[in-house]
Image: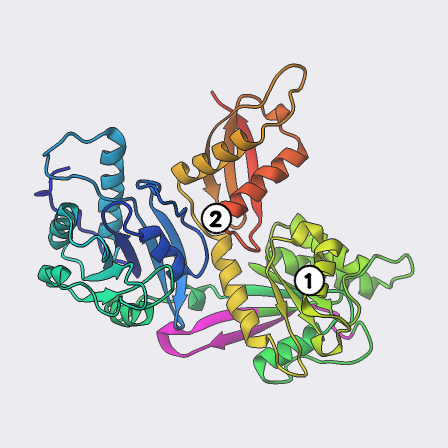
Amino acid sequence: MSMKKQTTQRTPTRTVAIVGRPNVGKSSIFNRLASRRIAIVHQDSGVTRDRLVCEVTWENRRFELIDTGGITCQDGSRGQTALEARINSQVEVAIGEAAAVIFVVDARAGLAALDEEVARLLRASGRPVFIAANKCDPPAGKEAPVEFLKFGWPAFPVSAQHGIGFDALMDAVLPVLPDVEDPSHVAPLKVAVVGRPNVGKSSYINKLLGDDRVMVADQPGTTRDVVDIPFSIGEGPEARHYVLMDTAGLRKPSKSASAADRLSQFRAGDGVARADVVVLLVDASAGPTADDKRVGGLIMEKKKGCVVLVSKWDLAGMSEREFREELSRGLPFMRHCPVVIASVKTGRGIRESVSVIDHVAAQTRLTLTTGLLSRALLDAWRRIKPRAVAGRRLHVFYSVQVGVAPITVRVFVNDPKLVDDSYRSYLVKALRGKFGLEGAPVLLQFRPRR
């Protein structure tokens, strides 16, 4: 790709692209802005080869963030490998989609020839550019090195390692992003609040709303139907819109249950099926019970994003660490779900739970490129290979994501019959270790390679 070629012009979306030469800390900055470890960070250059996209909320303002591979030589002074050409093409696409670009440079190494080439590419794009002079670590790094000011773009000293300087950087970036229609206004996020009877579901919703919108009583079974309640946080284009679904308490079916009870149980299950994210309430005073395990199993069966909210924490008889350990033992299949400690009485964790719900919703719709997925699963397969079956061993070739909510990954192998449940679980755990995917269901489909 020649530097004289103009970057393909597209209508910019509410997207920020991170670009720069290899090994300047782009992925570390991506992880810092995303507030979680998504991009693979490694001391060797060229680890990030594909675009990685995630939704980020910064100071209640939402946007998409794109991490890109390191830009290599563009001017034809040396031949490009096929991999380098593909990386540069991916970067070009990312810049074309972005409304703003964060140009990462290495403050410790100073201005490099490749930085000049990246700057020429960015000028050709016409996008607003903000320089992040990374590795301005304390105590010395308080200002961006002056040599980068020659590019004519605002420069900000940051330290991805220490989390310094990002407030000033994002205060400059966010105002240039276009105002776009909030998808949650057209299609509000549907959040089902579930749990066994009398665990505090209606009380939690009322506390969240700041109003007694649903009936609360000490007697179990007060809620008999699914109650849909519109709910918003914020105002204007930055407002987030939800539909909270209060459900009947889920319990083990009883032969003596009335028709109304059976219908309410069915509708509660239907509420889980309709939800985008499910909040499972667990009573801190009782700990995880068999009913909690049954409800959790329903959520996993429906393949829904999930947040575990520990209610009535003011009545807990143990430390938070002890309770989390007990929760992990009682609900081992939900260890990937974030846990929020909450109390309606004290207000602890109520607002925090909304941010965690947003995070899980974004995780369920995370898109991973074929390159990243294939490398992650191949690495896991190379680390631990399953036992041979009738003298045959499983071989993993490549993977591709084919769906979201749930995240669905198609894995091409020599023979799907060689994959058992334990090895499937191992591969899912490996994906979570690489990409987070907190609270998000992951479905692996094994297919024979043609």
The residue labelled by disc 2 is 435
| Residue 369 placement, left or right of 133 | right
- Can you give x and y, in whole percent of width and height, for residue 415 in the image? 57, 22
| Residue 409 placement, left or right of 112 | right
Looking at the rendering, the stretch of residues picked out in magenta corresponds to: 222-243
Tell me which label, 2 or 1, sits earlier in the chain. Answer: 1
- Residue 421 in magenta? no
Q: Nearest the camera: 345 or 23?
A: 23
Residue visible at 7% across and 43% down in the picture: 4
Q: Quadrant of residue 55?
A: bottom left
The residue labelled by disc 1 is 324
- Can you give x and y, in whole percent of width and height, for residue 387 in the image? 65, 24
Name the residue type under label 2: Phe
| Residue 52 placement, left or right of 132 | right
Q: Helix, strand, or loop for circle 1?
A: helix
Q: Quadrant of the N terminus?
A: top left
For the residues labelled 2 and 1, say whether their Cβ atoms are less than 8 Å apart.
no
**Residue 31 shows which numbered tag?**
none
Q: Nearest the camera: 55 or 273?
A: 55
Q: Nearest the camera: 439 or 34?
A: 34
How would you rate the neighbour count of disc 2 (Cα within 10 Å): few for under 14, some for 14-19, many for 20 or more?
some
Q: Is residue 226 visible?
A: no
The vertical placement of 103 against 215, above or below, is above
Residue visible at 72% across and 64% down in the picture: 322
